[in-house]
């Protein structure tokens, strides 16, 4: 499990003057569900295409199973790709689509027939052998694309925003479907998406990318609860990101008020960024709060209410199941454990970009 | 008739008028003349005269040259269209521009230019003489006619093929590579089958004018090599409309066969290529 199946070493890639990937190092362990997550143009798809062999890096190496495959064409690599718009062969039947790779590999007819049956069953589309590819719905086409890839028994499946073209309900169903497939097949999945919810739901490991750099790599819990910088905090879920000062270990001054926290080792009087998730902001009676503010907006979101509280010149985003009417004076408290301290970005590349999600 | 149907009928009016006036009626005239003699009596003589050796030989020569020039066009056009497909847009426009440039000149002028190039002691011969090589002597041979056909009709093969090739998603090709196919397997199993519609349009658009041309054979064949088109032209010029029409009908049979075969090739694939513009031309009007 701890074996490095794929190891990207110092990968750089640019298109013309556009630097897409800058000296990227990344390894993927065997049997891992790893997601490359980031906004468009962050280099996630390029990374996947370099692993798949559809792009070659300007510099750096791709190591697969301890072999350098940097210069190997895609047809010589033991991995398969699921493309965003399925890329089925529209001039073939479903069975012919699934058999494509096996026929190239010159497998016997009985072997191919068995594999087609097995793969169609696995993706819950038994009996679709003789349908034409373009007579299927988007979700069905995506399942066939998966079937077509996995019959070749790849060690790694690369998925390039495979659910991007599906509607919300289907996308959610397919997320569970993919997790099930991953568990049944026991192979490594490398998944590219810009959808943070997809990433959090399915992944063992998330790699958050922006502007060609890896911003943070870790489990979904780590990424969500302990974002390392403002970009990650902003990109994953809603958050209040506030420029603050670390007074000393376990004490941070936010908007002029001292809050207790659990972080140490930032030094004394150090400028930092603080992330507080909206569901972690507690609204109490004004005199009970660490700071006081006024509720200015209220929206019903189904599971919870979303409120905006103006306090000490900052608009706090607050999510709560308890309704607090607009115009109420409230106090704000935050559990020390829920205050995430981050170093200020060192370079401009790590700066949080405005996201129009 | 509801509103939408009324509007459709109104909008299609001009086209129906055009089709009836310029396609159906002339075609009926061809049938009428083809099946009658000079006095308007029914006869099969015009049709059956194809059995005469001079007409029969011209028809066979026309078919052979049309097939050869269509194949040569296909062999040149397909790789060219593939290269164009894989070329970046800025460069591609330039290549297409260079390619289409000769088409801005009149077809007749271009054919005459080839005559000047291929003629005995013409441009080609003087060029070869510079290197001490013997003259090529291809003017007035079938080779010269094929050369003229390929030169004139090549764009009609390239454009429809290019049109279907650019519509193939890059990822469809990537998927084939991803599944283990090398470049030639990808070409054979994915790219070519997905471009059948363009190939079939291209074949029709090159084969039909090649089969019916009389200008190219006139100019580059020196009037010695008669194609079926030349014979039809001569008959019409000599006021024997009936025989000309009869032979045209024979020609039409081969055009229809060509179209049916080509269409069959891409049945089941719903890619819409550039449609042939002169499906119904009888005497290949050039």
Image (cartoon, rainbow, N blue to C red):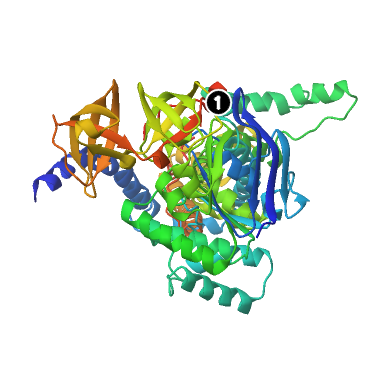
State which quadrant residue B45 falls in. Answer: bottom left
With A292 as the anchor, is A344 left or right in this view? right
Q: Residue furthest right?
A: B132
Where is residue A262 drawn, in percent x and y? Answer: 47, 38
> How many residues crowd mark 1 within 10 Å: few (<14), some (14–19), many (20+)?
few
Q: Is residue B175 visible?
A: yes
Where is residue B134 drawn, in percent x and y? Answer: 87, 30
Q: Residue furthest left?
A: B2
State which quadrant residue A320 falls in. Answer: top left
Where is residue B6 drawn, in percent x and y? Answer: 12, 45
Q: Quadrant of the C terminus of chain A?
A: top left
- Residue, disc 1: A267
State which quadrant residue B152 falls in. Answer: top right
Q: Is residue B122 visible?
A: no
Q: Quadrant of the N terminus of chain A?
A: bottom right
Q: Give the camera-side residue of A315 and A36.
A: A315
Q: Give the camera-side residue of B186 and A230.
A: A230
Where is residue A157 drawn, in percent x and y? Answer: 58, 56
- Helix, strand or loop at label 1? It is loop
Q: Give the camera-side residue of A341 and B115.
A: A341
């Amino acid at each position: 499990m701890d074996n490095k199946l794929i190891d990207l070493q110092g990968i750089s890639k640019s298109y013309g003057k556009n630097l897409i990937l800058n000296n990227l190092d990344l390894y993927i362990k065997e049997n891992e569900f790893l997601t490359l997550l980031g906004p468009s143009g962050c280099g996630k798809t390029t990374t996947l295409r370099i692993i798949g062999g559809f792009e070659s890096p300007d510099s750096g190496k791709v190591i697969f199973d301890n072999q350098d495959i940097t210069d190997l064409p895609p047809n010589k690599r033991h991995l398969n790709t699921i493309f965003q718009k399925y890329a089925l062969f529209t001039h073939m039947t479903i069975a012919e689509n699934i058999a494509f790779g096996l026929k190239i590999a010159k497998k016997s007819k009985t072997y191919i027939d068995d594999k087609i049956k097995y793969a169609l069953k696995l993706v819950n589309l038994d009996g679709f052998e003789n349908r034409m590819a373009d007579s299927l719905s988007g979700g069905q086409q995506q399942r066939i694309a998966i079937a077509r890839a996995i019959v070749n028994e790849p060690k790694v499946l690369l998925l390039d925003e495979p659910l991007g073209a599906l509607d919300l309900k289907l996308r959610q169903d397919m997320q569970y479907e993919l997790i099930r497939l991953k568990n049944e097949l026991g192979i490594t999945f490398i998944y590219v998406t810009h959808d943070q919810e997809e990433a959090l739901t399915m992944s063992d490991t998330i790699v958050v990318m922006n502007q060609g750099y890896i911003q943070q790599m870790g489990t979904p819990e780590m990424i969500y609860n302990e974002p390392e910088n403002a970009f990650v905090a902003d990109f994953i879920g809603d958050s209040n990101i506030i420029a603050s000062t670390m007074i000393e270990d376990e004490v941070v001054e936010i908007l002029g008020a001292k809050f207790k926290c659990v972080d140490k080792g930032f030094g004394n009087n150090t400028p930092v960024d603080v992330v507080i998730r909206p569901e972690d902001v507690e609204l109490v009676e004004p005199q009970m709060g660490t700071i006081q503010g006024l509720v200015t907006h209220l929206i019903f979101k189904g599971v919870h209410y979303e409120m905006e509280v103006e306090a000490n010149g900052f608009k706090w985003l607050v999510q709560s199941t308890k309704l607090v009417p607009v115009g109420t004076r409230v106090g704000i408290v935050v559990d020390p454990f829920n205050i995430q301290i981050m170093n200020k970005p060192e370079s401009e590349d790590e700066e949080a970009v405005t996201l129009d999600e | 008739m509801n509103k939408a149907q009324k509007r459709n009928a109104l909008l299609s009016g001009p086209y129906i008028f055009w089709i009836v006036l310029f396609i159906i009626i002339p075609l009926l005239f061809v049938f009428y003349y083809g099946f009658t003699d000079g006095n308007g009596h029914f006869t099969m003589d015009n049709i059956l005269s194809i059995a005469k050796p001079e007409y029969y030989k011209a028809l066979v020569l026309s078919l052979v040259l049309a097939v050869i020039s269509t194949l040569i066009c296909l062999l040149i056009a397909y790789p060219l269209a593939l290269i164009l497909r894989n070329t970046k847009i800025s460069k591609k426009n330039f290549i297409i521009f260079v390619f289409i440039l000769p088409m801005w000149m009149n077809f007749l002028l271009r054919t005459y230019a080839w005559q000047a190039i291929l003629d005995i002691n013409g441009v080609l011969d003087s060029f070869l003489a510079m290197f001490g090589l013997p003259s090529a002597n291809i003017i007035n041979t079938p080779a010269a006619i094929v050369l003229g056909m390929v030169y004139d009709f090549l764009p009609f093969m390239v454009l429809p093929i290019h049109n279907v090739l650019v519509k193939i998603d890059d990822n469809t090709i990537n998927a084939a590579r991803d599944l283990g196919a090398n470049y030639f397997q990808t070409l054979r199993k994915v790219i070519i089958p997905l471009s059948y519609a363009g190939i079939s349009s291209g074949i029709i658009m090159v084969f039909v004018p090649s089969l019916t041309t009389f200008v190219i054979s006139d100019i580059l064949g020196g009037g010695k090599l008669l194609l079926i088109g030349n014979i039809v032209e001569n008959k019409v010029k000599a006021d024997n409309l009936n025989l000309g029409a009869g032979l045209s009908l024979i020609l039409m049979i081969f055009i229809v066969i060509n179209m049916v075969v080509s269409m069959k090739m891409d049945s089941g694939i719903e890619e819409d290529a550039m449609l042939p513009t002169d499906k119904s031309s009888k005497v290949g009007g050039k």
